[in-house]
Amino acid sequence: MNTVKNSLIQVSDIEINIERKDIKNLHIGVYPPNGRVRVASPLNIDDEAVRLAVISRLSWIKRQIKNFQEQRRESKREMVSGESHYFLGKRYLLDVIYDSRKHFIVLKHSKIELHINPNTSTENRYKLLQEWYRKELNKIVSKLMDKWEKKIGVKLNNWQIKKMRTKWGSCNIEKKSVLINLHLARVPIECIEYIIVHELVHLLQRYHNDEFKMYMDKFLPEWKKCRDVLNQSYLPYEEWVI
């Protein structure tokens, strides 16, 4: 059995990672934080064919790289008292409270109280905050999914919350399954609702064409404002993969 290996090529001073898979179509992606370019290629396409495909999309690729490099980002999170964190679009100050009991988080007025053991590492403090975000977002998404499935007239088989680096949400139409980005816990609830409606509308129309936009206008007339808010949101500093 022949094994087709992944490879690396250069196109116009851009490093292109080629990952070969058992797929039908070639896909070019540009990924944060710095605009890494990856090509998912069918097994039977050679490097030269990939190079030609990349060249045909070179202007688009360079625009995406430039966008990522210019996008605003938070500074590194130290997880100490006085540090700013966001929940549902509102800025909160972190208040680290040392406690020998079970670790937990409480949202109190303008603060996120992080109750932890004094010896808790920065990484574990970060993980605790992400777990809290997940729990809170799960409650919000559960209610909004029920609401919008009924309004749009569709029914999912399942949905999940997942940390994603390139998308706020995604929809597997065949499986009727939706993924929601964990980082949405940081943005206004209207933006969370927009992503949910966006992904559910894909069950009516796969592509972002005029019909798709017509559905979005019908169900959520202010959707473009929410899209713009998300496009202007700070990217979180990512040091750990949770």
Image: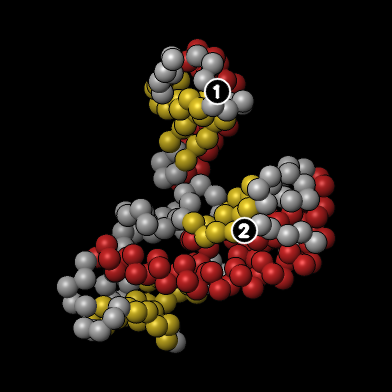
* Location of residue 210 with respect to 231 vertically, above or below: above
Q: CA distance from mark 1 to mark 2?
A: 29 Å
Pointers 1 and 2 in contact (C-beta within 8 Å) = no
Instruction: Give the quadrant of the N terminus.
Output: top left
Q: Give me the residue at 32% from left, 54% from top.
A: 240
- Of the residues under marks 1 and 2, which one precedes in the sequence? 1
Left or right of 55: which side holds 206? right
Q: Is residue 233 visible?
A: no
Is disc 1 placed on a helix, strand or loop? strand
Task: Give the mark count.
Answer: 2
In the rendering, at what x and y percent does residue 106 appear?
39, 83
Residue situated furthest left in the rendering: 119
Residue that badge 1 annotates? 42
Q: Quadrant of the C terminus?
A: bottom left
- Which circle marks residue 158 in the picture? 2
Q: Residues within 10 Å of mark 2 (few under 14, many from 20)?
A: few
Percent x, y of residue 197: 70, 60
The residue under the point 34% across, 79% down is 104
Color theme of the render: secondary structure
